[in-house]
Amino acid sequence: MGGMGKTTLAKKIFNQLVPRFGKSCSFLDDVKEKTKTKGLVELQKQLLYDISYSKLHRNIVNSDDGINVIEETICNKKVLIVLDDVDDSDQIRKLIGTNYLYPGTRVLVTTRDSGILNNRGLKYEFKHCELHGLSDKHALQLFSRHAFANDSPLDDYHTLSKSIVSTTGGLPLALQAIGSSLFGLKEIEIWEGMLEKLRKTPHDDVLGKLRITYDTLESGHQQIFLDVACFFIGRNKTEPIFVWKDCGFIPEYAIVVLTKRSMIKILDNNIFWMHDQFRDLGRAIAKVEHTRFWDRDDITFELRLGENKRSVRALCLQAEVGNPITITAEQIERFPNLQFLWLSNVICQGDFTGCLSKLKWIGVRYSHKFYSGLEPKHLQGFKATNLPTENLVVLKLSGLEFTEEKVSSLIESAVTTAKVRGVEFLNVWAVSDFERAWGGTKLVRNMVDKPLCSWGK
């Protein structure tokens, strides 16, 4: 079950054991999610980089190559590896292998399904350790720390607190989230209402209990929470904050509220982090409400319907190399309230003039694999005559075809309208790397006046 504190405990054990293994340590967090978004090869590269302190990882092109190098490495040295949130036995085989491990090696795996640890063909075995919810005493203590900033409830709330705690099954995440949502609220009626909702939620329905805390958020805070859950986990907060400001939200305050409620964290370098249970909750809500889309099949289905979708706020479409997807201005204008649009290896066609007047962020990217086998004169990903720049705050273009001339023409109107609107922050990021691909010159140009632009790569 999620929310038990498996990752927290694994990190604590990992940190305690690190001194015994020197540099031969790797903590791969959120394996399930990263396998979907980045692929096992990227996880293999990260693992090798962590434990081998060499350049071996650079030579991996597929998962078979990766596991061969990993097995050769970990069969000949003592290593410490944590695989966090594994949901498929194949992930263990591709990240650890099947051969004997070097004496003294330790591998920790966290999972919601212990059955995947009973993996046939392995020449090593796992010892199972099942986590249970907190005891009533410790559960009440954790809840109280978040609801009262104390180790025990206030006298007038003691009975209510014990009743609320009894509905959580001792799940630390639920205790933190529910307690934080009640912090500072003195009206007994509010506490009784929370208890009633929790009692109506099945005992093992973690997302249902977390949904109750989401429902207590202000509308703007809910929107920011959903944006983070769907798109910004692991991303820097700077650019989203400026976009949210331009949408009329107060993002700094929202982030404080969400952090206090344990719904998000801000890590080093201002990176968003979110517990996978809250991530799953946010994405489930977005799917039900049809406000944010990131699944390729879901987006292509919506594009084929030919219906206006006023509820959609964000689209993130990534096409597979070798399986192109074309999106036209006529299709995209069916999402009139779109504020975020990210396209990766997607062919764009048409005249976007007058489309998407509420759009704040556009990202268009073409990888080097997209152009594989093409001559520079045949670069054909971006065929649109323009982009909707009326209310842009962030524009990011990346690909061989984004020459200085093309980028200048695309962003000219964005710069003009930004100045007229007095936009606090306009980020234009354009990269066309001819030096690496075609032997030409590298183009990374600041196209916007300094007061309006943040430039990076």
Image: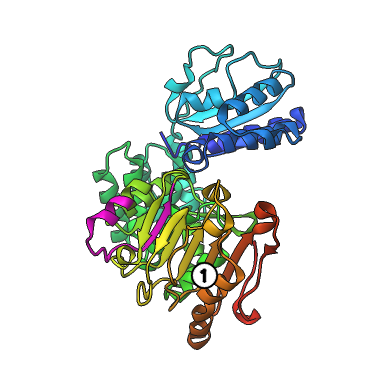
Q: Residue at x 65, y 58 (%)?
A: 433
Question: Percent x, y for residue 229?
Answer: 44, 53
Question: Percent x, y for residue 296?
Answer: 37, 48
Q: Residue at x 25, y 50 (%)?
A: 196
Q: Quadrant of the C terminus?
A: bottom right
The one of 354 and 246 positioned closer to us in this rendering: 354
Question: Percent x, y for residue 352?
Answer: 38, 72
Would residue 183 be seen by someone viewing this image from the given angle? no
Amino acid type of disc 1?
A: Val
The one of 91 and 144 positioned closer to us in this rendering: 91
Left or right of 177 on screen, residue 397? right
The one of 107 and 180 positioned closer to us in this rendering: 107
The magenta segment: 300-319
- The residue wearing badge 1 is 394
Question: Compared with residue 130, is residue 159 higher up or lower down, i.e. above or below?
Answer: below
Residue at far bottom of view: 420
Question: Compared with residue 138, is residue 194 higher up or lower down, i.e. above or below?
Answer: below
> Within the magenta stretch, is there residue 308?
yes
Callout 1 secondary element: strand
Colour basis: rainbow
Left or right of 86 on screen, residue 327? left
The image quadrant of residue 113 is top left
Would residue 326 be seen by someone viewing this image from the given angle? yes
Q: Residue at x 23, y 60 (%)?
A: 306
Q: Residue at x 70, y 62 (%)?
A: 441
Number of numbered discs visible in the structure rendering: 1
Question: Compared with residue 320, is residue 237 higher up or lower down, i.e. above or below?
Answer: below
The image quadrant of residue 400 is bottom right
Q: Quadrant of the N terminus?
A: top left
Crowdedness near tag 1: few (<14), some (14–19) or many (≥20) residues, C-alpha within 10 Å: many
Question: Percent x, y for residue 310?
Answer: 27, 66
> Within the magenta stretch, is there residue 281?
no
